[in-house]
Image: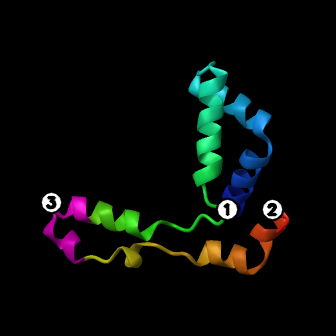
Amino acid sequence: MRAYVEAIHYYATHKEDALKIMQKYSRVNDRKVLEESWNYHVQFTPRAPYPPVEGYQTILQDVALTNPKAAQANAKDFVDMRFVKELEDSGFIKSLWGK
């Protein structure tokens, strides 16, 4: 989780490097497309990447169509926020961003 948080920070703070990496692995050479993608991800990727419980609940609803037991499940039972919380509480995430 620590490496993932550091990667989020690196991606957001090293734009040119991130664009080169994106270009290499996506095989997209259009700078405008790469920049739009980078801007989108920087805007919407949270600095503290807590799992989206509502997203998991949506998945459970979809699974319930073929497995009725999923309708009784609570998404909160499937996510563990403690690792991100520990990094946040320790000040690690704040120290990366300087805030």
- Residue 22, given in percent of the width and then of the height, sits at 65, 32
Dominant SS type (magenta):
helix
The quadrant the C terminus occupies is bottom right
Q: What range is drawn magenta here?
A: 61-72
Foreground mark, 2 or 3? Answer: 2
Q: Earlier in the sequence, mark 2 or mark 3?
A: 3
The image quadrant that residue 85 belongs to is: bottom right
Please tell me how crowded label 2 is: few (under 14), some (14-19), or many (20+) other residues with Cα within 10 Å: few
Q: What residue did someone put label 1 on? A: 47
Which of the labelled discs sits on residue 65, or is there none?
A: 3
Does 16 sit above or below residue 48? above
Does 2 sit above or below residue 90? above
- Residue 66, given in percent of the width and then of the height, sits at 14, 59
Q: Dots 2 and 1: beta carbons under 8 Å?
A: yes
- Residue 84, given in percent of the width and then of the height, sits at 63, 72
The image quadrant that residue 95 belongs to is: bottom right
Task: Return the residue found at the far top.
Answer: 29
Q: What residue did someone put label 2 on? A: 97
Q: Earlier in the sequence, mark 2 or mark 1?
A: 1
Q: Amino acid at mark 3?
A: Leu
Does 39 sit above or below residue 32? below
Does 20 sit above or below residue 39? above
